[in-house]
Amino acid sequence: MARRYMAAERPDHTLQASALVNEAYLKLIDVQRMHWQNRAQFFGVCAQLMRRILVDFGRKRHNLKRGGGARSVTLDEDLVVTAAHTTDLVALDDALNALATVDPRRVRVVELRFFAGLSVEEAAEVLNVSPDTVTRDWRLAKVWLHRELKKGKER
């Protein structure tokens, strides 16, 4: 799941799929005696964790206390994270939080499809809805998020 998500990320992203899995695992083991009801619940929780990890990563990159405006200098120039892409992830999280006040299920669909990389059928299983509902929610969420992100850039 992490490899599929990271493959869709920009090539200069410093977080690797294995690091994303490790971070998610560390958060999962903090959950005291979680009794997983099924595979779908597990993937749903993993999708939320990956979203939080990636957004936290993006926010930390731009935290002014840590020199967020300065360009990182590394031994491997291919690993430098650009400000624009990390800001996009933070803006996406802000837009998802706004969408959650209107339609929480659509946010879950975005988490499962975008962050966890689940198929429509897998997301439908996690949410206990039909694949058609997931497809409709996915389409409407993308339009809503596109509009919100566009508004944010105009400000």
Image: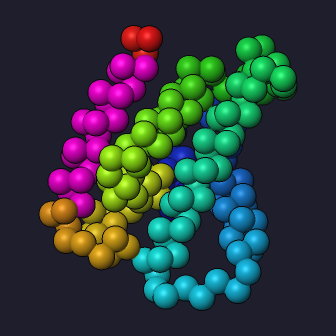
Residue 147 found in image quarter: top left
Q: Position of residue 114 (x, y in %)?
A: 41, 50
What residue is shown at x 55% (from left), y 85% (from top)? Answer: 36
Residue 4, horizontal then vertical, whole percent: 48, 54
Foreground pick, 87 / 96: 96
- Asked if residue 5 lies left or right of residue 154, the reply is right
Front residue of 112/108: it is: 108
Highlighted range, magenta: 134-152
- Specify the farthest residue to the front: 101
Count every numbered label the image shows and give the total: 0
Question: Residue at 76% of width from left, 72% of height from top?
Answer: 30
Main SS of residues in magenta: helix
Front-most of residues 39 and 108: 108
Q: Viewed as shown, does residue 87 lie left or right of 143?
A: right
Q: Is residue 73 visible?
A: no
Residue 83 in percent (x, y) is at 62, 20
For residue 106, say whether it is visible: yes
Q: Is residue 101 above or below residue 27?
A: above
Q: Is residue 111 above or below residue 26?
A: above
Q: Is residue 40 left or right of residue 34?
A: left
Q: Magenta segment: does it hold 149?
A: yes
Q: Residue at x 78, y 20 (%)?
A: 64
Q: Quadrant of residue 11?
A: top right
- Residue 22 image point, x, y percent: 72, 61
Q: Residue, x 68% and y 71% (percent of image)? A: 28
